Image (tube, rainbow, N blue to C red):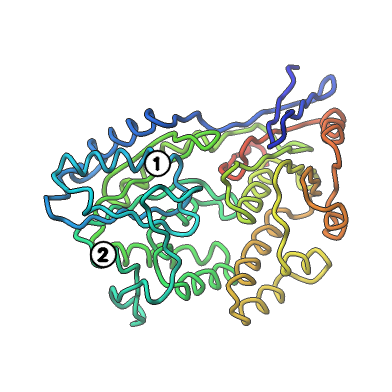
Amino acid sequence: MTAILVQYGRSDPLILEVGVGARAVELAGPRGVEGAAASALVHAAVTGAVSGPPLPAHAVPGDRVVVGIAGGVPQAPAVLAALHECLSHAGVAPADVSVLVAPGGAAVLPAGASGFGGAAADTAYLAADAGGRPLYLARGLVDADLVVEVGGWRWDASLAAPDPAGAIWPAFGRTECGLLLERRLALRGRGALPGRQAAVRRVRWQLGVAASLRLVPGRGATLHAACFGMPDEAAAAARKAAAGWRPLVEAPAALAVATVSADGGGPAAFTRAVAAAARVTRPDGTICLVGAVPAPGPVFRRWREGVAVRPLVEEAVAGNDPHLVGDAVQTRLFARALGQRRIVLLSTLDDALVDDLDFGNARTPEAVERLAARAESLVVLHEADRMLPRCRLV
C-alpha cells in the first residue's frame, strides 16, 4: 500500500505502512480556503442568506453594530474584512462597528477587536431565564442596535453532537453563568445539552439576534464553508456543510493514529480527538495520539491513579472552582469515550508524567511506525478533534 504521511507539528512527518494483508484507512476533513478566498466565501454567504435578509439589509446608517465572535472561528481576519465591507456598503461607518471576541473565539485576537472575559463590570442585564434568574450579557451586545453572531461550527465527538462553544451563550455571559453550565455538563454529560440549547435560544430571542454567521473549518485552519441567516437555519446549513468531517469506515480498527488540529483548543481538543478515534477503534484496540498534548489537570490525574470518576466529578463540582469543574468535564467525557482501549502518546509531555498516567509512551516516531507495521488494521485520523466519524460495523 501507499505510505500514509502524518504531519504532527514536527519537521518530518510520520510514515505509516501496514503489513501485507492488513487493512488501512485514512480519514481527513474537507479542504478549505484562506485569505482573500475566505473573505470572498464569507461575502457570498452574508449577501445570499440561507434564511432572512442579507447582512446589508439588517443595518442602516448610524446603527451601532457589534460583531460577537465565539467558538474558534477560522480565518478570523478574513471573515471580519468581509463583514466590514458589507456593513460599509449598508452605510454603517467603521467607527460604529466594534468586534467582541469571547475566550477561545479566535486563535489570535484580530486587529481592532476587544476580548471579553466574563467580568461582571463588562455585562448588563438582558432578561430573566425560565427559572426567574437574571441573565447578564456582554454590555456591548446588549447596547447594540445590531448584533452579528459569528461562531465556529464543528463536531464534538466526546458529546456525539455539534460543539456548543460557537453559540453566543454562555460565551458572552458572566463567568458564573458559564460555570453553572459546565457544572451541569460535568454531572450530566450529554443530558445537559437540551437545557443548554434552550438557554441559547432564549438569549438569542431576548437579544433579537437575526444575523448569525456559522463557519465550518477546513483542514489546516482554513475555512471550508460559511452559512448566514437566522440562527437555527444558519446552524442547520453549517451542519450539512460539515458532512465531510463525518467520514465512514466499514469496520473498527485495531489501531487508530490521531492528530489534533493546530488551533484545536487545549484539553477539550485532546478529549474530542480521543473520542473520535474511539468511534472507529475496537473496544480492545489502541489509540495513538501524536502531536501537542496538554498536561492533564488534577481531576484527570487522580482518575488515572485509580479513583472512580463519579466521586471525583462530584467533589470538583461541589468546590465550584472553574478550573477543576472544567477538568472534571473533560475527565468524565474522556473516560466514557476511552472505555478499555489503550492510549499511546507521541508528545512533548515528560516521560515520568506519561508513566504516571499509565499511558503508553512512544518516545520516538519510529515507535509509532512499528505499531502501525504490526497492526492487523489501522485507521489514521487527521485533525481528529474536528471529526465525528461513523463505523458501519460496530
Residue at 71% x, 25% y is 5
Q: In which quarter of the image is residue 208?
A: bottom left
Give the numbered dot on residue 77.
Answer: 1
- Observer-side mark, 2 or 1, equals 1
Please tell me whether mark 2 sits on a helix, a strand or a loop: helix
Q: In which quarter of the image is residue 336?
A: bottom right
Q: Distance between the residues labelled 2 and 1?
A: 25 Å
In the picture, the quarter occupied by the N terminus is top right
Q: Is residue 142 above or below residue 65?
A: below
Q: Residues within 10 Å of mark 1 (few under 14, many from 20)?
A: many
Give the numbered dot on residue 207.
Answer: 2
Q: Which amino acid does label 2 sit on?
A: Leu
Front-lying residue, 232 or 92: 92
In the picture, the quarter occupied by the C terminus is top right
**Residue 279 placement, left or right of 81:** right
**Residue 300 placement, left or right of 260:** right
**In the image, residue 226 lies at what x, y percent?**
36, 38
Residue at 38% x, 28% y is 37
Q: How crowded is mark 2: few (under 14 residues within 10 Å), some or many (20 or more)?
A: some
Front-lying residue, 17 or 32: 32
